[in-house]
Image (spheres, rainbow, N blue to C red):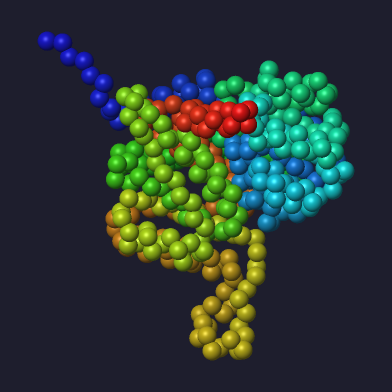
Amino acid sequence: MKYERNFYQIKSNDEILLNLKDELKTVGYYSLPFQDVGEIETYAASIKSKYIYIIGIGGSTLGTKAIYTFLRATNNYDKKLYFLDTIDPLRINYLLSIGDMNDSHFIVISKSGSTIEPVSVLKYLESKITICNGNCTVIAGENTRLFDFAQKNKIRAFFIPENLGGRFSVFSVVGLLPLSIIGVNIKNLLKGCQIVHESFFNEKEYYDLIINKARFLVENKARFTVNIIFSYSSVFKDFNKWFVQLWAESLGKKNINNTRQGLTPISLIGPDDQHSFLQLIMEGVRDKTVTFFKIENLKDESVIPDDTKFSIFKSNYMNGKSFNDLINFQADSTYEAILQEKDIPCDKITIEVIDEINIAKLMYRFFLLTSSIGSFLQINTYDQPGVELGKSILIRKFNS
């Protein structure tokens, strides 16, 4: 008797860890926490312009924007950072009007070197101001048209390694350079990544947290198809968008049996979305998991005053409470309400304080969670074939 099979089987945690250790040799993001950033810091210090514009889209900007939005509320940066991550002319011209183009530096990012959105914006900028080595830096794949453009015009260029995908690139020069230019401590960013990386691969705290959550999501993927992050603070707004791309573009794939896989990400901001989406979570179809984020210390001491003028509202329980406490009470109350339903899988991540180490730890944790799920699903976590057709159709439309 001869027997062959290709059944999809969920592998053991040990096998997944071995798979990821094998990926250390080939997948670019794993080595980023341990890089030497001296050259990046030296070049960043040479940029004196007040207004820094990043021209890119998707993975070229989302991670950097996530970190910047998280940090800027509690840090006073001398330079202004703007993201030309759009082809909406109204948005482009508005952003350009905010700054002074003669006191601006433009960082153009495209791994392929020919992504239509940033190239279009770059060409538009040239119609407004001469793009040269004094006001422009290029970050691109080697031997690409954008890289060649930089060399031809004597513009400083950094290259993106071939084994580093855009959505995993924020802790490379893609994110570190613009963040360093405005004054973010990029060494602390990498320190946060190192903490999670070493804990995970040495099978300590982060290994247990990440691998067990990944296994749960994969074992229950047919039942809980929607994964919600519920972030309690506006500083998470762009982190949420970064998560959506990471989750959707990495995990929406066909596996080794050509079976379609994927988990659907949804991002919410609390308390705003308590007044919209929470009803669906609480009493709708049980097809969702929820992960809460909160910040213990927002570095803001604003207090709700005890003012007799407002006694009519009978809300004395708020008097003297800080807004920091109020938003965290709301996060905890919503989490407890969902727990009481007993059939909605949920977890909560509390960040102690807003700083570089904590945002890096959070993002690197999600890198490893995504890689772990991809390995469980037996897919290629790092490609994105599903987006290529739309790009080719767009090019044909422009050329027709």
* Quadrant location, the C terminus: top right
Residue 64, located in which quarter of the rendered image? Answer: top right
**In the figure, 6 relative to 288: above or below?**
above
Res 48 visible: yes
Residue 363, located in which quarter of the rendered image? Answer: top right
Residue 8, located in which quarter of the rendered image? Answer: top left
x and y percent of residue 208 in the render?
40, 39
Q: Nearer the viewer, residue 40 or 265?
A: 265
The residue drawn where x is 46% and y is 21% is 22
**In the figure, 49 relative to 111: above or below?**
below
x and y percent of residue 240 in the render?
53, 49
Give the side of residue 122 with respect to residue 131, left or right. left
The residue drawn where x is 37% and y is 50% is 289
Give the side of residue 182 with respect to residue 343, left or right. right
The residue drawn where x is 43% and y is 60% is 277
Q: Nearer the viewer, residue 101 or 164?
A: 101
Q: Nearer the viewer, residue 120 or 322?
A: 120
Q: Residue furthest top?
A: 1
Q: Residue furthest left?
A: 1
x and y percent of residue 215 in the render?
35, 38
**In the figure, 133 relative to 64: above or below?**
above
x and y percent of residue 269 in the render?
52, 58
Q: Residue furthest front?
A: 400
* Quadrant location, the N terminus: top left
Res 171 visible: no
The residue drawn where x is 68% and y is 17% is 143
